[in-house]
Image (cartoon, helix red, strand yellow):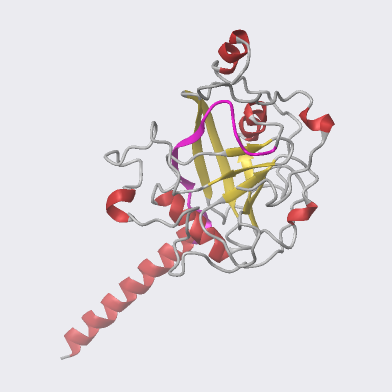
Amino acid sequence: MSARNPTPQDDESKGKDIPSILPLAPGGVYAVKWETRMKRAEKLAITPLPDYRNPFGEAKAENPIAFFDIVAGGYYLGRVEVEVKRDMCPITAENFLKLVEYKCYAGTKFKVYPGNWLVGGDISDLDEVVWDANDPEFFNYPELLPEVRAGGQSIYEDALFKDENFDLKHDGPGVLTMYNDDEPDANGSRFMITFDTKNKELDGKHVAFGQVVSGFDLLYSLQKLGDARQEGDTFQRVTIEKCGIKSTGSNAVAAMAQQQQQQQHEIAVRFRGFRER
């Protein structure tokens, strides 16, 4: 991802506590003190955020809840749960939910832009240490999707799909929104989650379709691994180890019940016709 898409805000007050990556030394090793390198190899400490509030209010029972299990530097950090706003963006929601359901996001990495947002969901760039094609918890790309589009793709036929709507705004931290290479109608598998309240530049350009309802403190703490140069690099590799659907939402339950009733009705009609012969 280019730092220009969208443009992360360089705010010194935001980044003052976030260490920068120093220039590379010969051989590709960061030119930092040994003590600093050792500290950066430790498990990330999660800072609680008791004041965090869901940007769109309480999750609705009719909407699904998806989850990601996050690892960084080889350490398991915890689980993040997001409400997917199927009531507001059904097409965008279906794309995201199917990618979660098929385990496509397991093994993908996060890019972190401190003070702004993180970007995930590039199914063409997997963490080879975590991803395992022989494990059913991961999507078998070589066998099932060997020519995956660079940068990722959607579940739909054209790989990228149109912007559904811009009804939900980027008014606060924890907004789940689509990433689109700074082009309209170019939604694939990549998504973003906001860190801050100042994200108005995303309105009208990125389709917001959900919110973090649990584990935002974990995501927020990832900023400590980020690069203040706003290039997305992290001191430790941050990866989705596992993904899934925690709750399908009451809409799905109701639809399934209605489908079963319809099937029972069709069976009854066929049976009645058989008796009348």
The relative height of residue 265 versus residue 125 in the rendered view (above or below) is below
Q: Position of residue 93 (x, y in %)?
A: 54, 59
Question: Which residue is at the front of the view, 34 or 277?
Answer: 34
Left or right placement of residue 32 versus residue 57 in this view: left
Q: Position of residue 19 (x, y in %)?
A: 70, 23
Picture quadrant where residue 241 is located: top left
Residue visible at 41% across and 48% down in the picture? 104
Report the residue that reaches farthest toward the right.
Answer: 13
Report the residue that reaches farthest toward the front.
Answer: 26
Residue 36 drawn in magenta: no
Residue visible at 64% across and 66% down in the picture? 184
Left or right placement of residue 277 versus residue 216 in this view: left
Residue visible at 46% across and 69% down in the picture? 158
Picture quadrant where residue 224 is located: top right
Q: Position of residue 6 (x, y in %)?
A: 70, 51
Question: Which residue is at the front of the view, 47 or 264?
Answer: 47
- Per the rendered image, the range of residues in magenta is 230-251
Question: Which residue is at the front of the view, 61 or 190?
Answer: 190
Q: Position of residue 147 (x, y in %)?
A: 36, 57
The relative height of residue 41 versus residue 175 in the rendered view (above or below) is above
Residue 242 drawn in magenta: yes
